[in-house]
Image (spheres, rainbow, N blue to C red):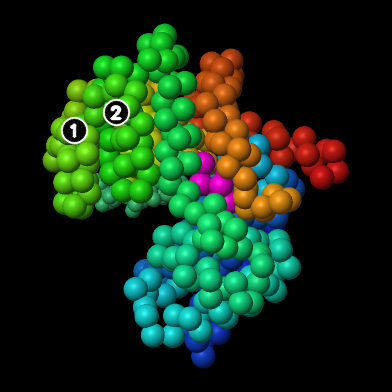
Amino acid sequence: MRVLQAAAEREHEQVVFFNYPEVGLKAIVGIHNTVLGPSLGGCRMRLYKDEEQAFEDVLRLSEGMTYKSSLAGLDLGGGKSCIIADPHMKEGREELFVQFGKCVEALSGRYIAAEDMGTSVQDVVYMQRETEHLSGRDPADGGGGDPSPWTARGVHGSIVAACERVYGTSDLAGRKVALQGVGHVGMYLLDSLVKAGAAVTICDTNESHLELAKKEYGVEVCGLDDIYDVDCDVYAPCATGQTVNPETVARMKCKIIAGAANNQLSDPGVYNNIEAKEILYCPDFAINSGGVISCAGELQPGGWNEGWVADKVDNIYFTMQRVLDEAQKRGRFTELVAIELAKERIEQRREQGN
Ligand SMILES: NC(=O)c1ccc[n+]([C@@H]2O[C@H](COP(=O)([O-])OP(=O)(O)OC[C@H]3O[C@@H](n4cnc5c(N)ncnc54)[C@H](O)[C@@H]3O)[C@@H](O)[C@H]2O)c1
């Protein structure tokens, strides 16, 4: 594995490996860029196929966090950590996370950890014994609590911005939305879309989530694979990544793709497929930053403040407008332009000497 070369290709500042076999801890922390501020990003726990896969995950995700935080106007950089272990482990979990807390502490605040896939608020509580460099805490502990409503609010604002562009109106009444995944974020998004008068079709792998959505909102349900064929204006992926690929785009009838899921596009090659169908793509990292904004709120002087978080989340609508304006001006795909804008803010800060 050519570690330094891989890190250099993505312009990472630092990648740190931790190995504590006595507690079963094998972890990688990726610090992509700290020009705007300390790197912040979740700690994932997963049984990776091999170390290369974990390493690649850390690099990709921490780079994404740099762009997400920069575009959200936060004074934070991009970071992420992966613990290579069974996320369902019970025995020894406490010792493992206490040790990982020590690892985070050893980075002296250059990396701020939070919960992510496979980790929980309880794991953050274990880490808290050894480090203060954490976010995503319980409200009882001065934290912002569940970030999902904030993420959904940012995605909703972006759907409005995109509808204004495509249909010339911000009114969502009668707009048809295909919503994939009604979990934490998806259910909040469903609520706000239905309240705005949209007609939503949903799918989910989890029967109880579907039942709840049907009972609360009386929405239409389709099969897991049928979501790509739904006759709709907006496809909103809120489940897993990489659902937007040449095969699914060929089937889509929507004019807009806007959802909360991370890494929605299978690869940059799919840009051409999306453009060829004249679909407006809202870059995931530009619109799903509500959660990281809430985490950033905890780090503000005086602690988490709802007004501060709400202002920043509502600003995602204007960020989306700017991405669309610039994409038109620069004649390039929205995702590329969103990355450019994020990098430009970092460059400006670098020139000002941080
Ligand atoms: N929670 C946040 O604040 C936040 C912030 C940024 C990004 N995201 C991303 O948004 C997405 C959703 O996050 P979440 O917190 O709501 O997760 P979640 O696990 O609570 O919800 C995901 C939902 O999708 C369903 N699902 C899984 N695979 C599916 C499939 N193939 N087809 C249809 N449904 C499927 C699950 O059953 C679940 O109901 C994830 O990709 C996550 O990384 C979440």
- Whole-percent x and y of residue 42? 52, 59
Q: Which residue is mark 1?
A: 219
- Whole-percent x and y of residue 180? 27, 40
- Whole-percent x and y of residue 235? 31, 30
Residue situated furthest bottom in the rendering: 22
State the image quarter where residue 110 is shown: bottom right
Residue 18 drawn in magenta = no
Residue situated furthest right in the rendering: 353
Indicate which disc residue 194 carries.
Answer: 2
Q: Earlier in the sequence, mark 1 or mark 2?
A: 2
Pick the quarter of the image with the C terminus.
top right
**Can see residue 4?**
no
Q: Amino acid at mark 1?
A: Val
In the image, the segment drawn in magenta is 290-295
Query: Do labels 1 and 2 touch, CB within 8 Å?
Result: yes
- Figure check: 79 above or below 196: below
- Identify the residue shown where x is 34% and y is 73%: 88
Indicate which disc residue 228 carries.
Answer: none
Q: Is residue 337 left or right of residue 274?
A: right
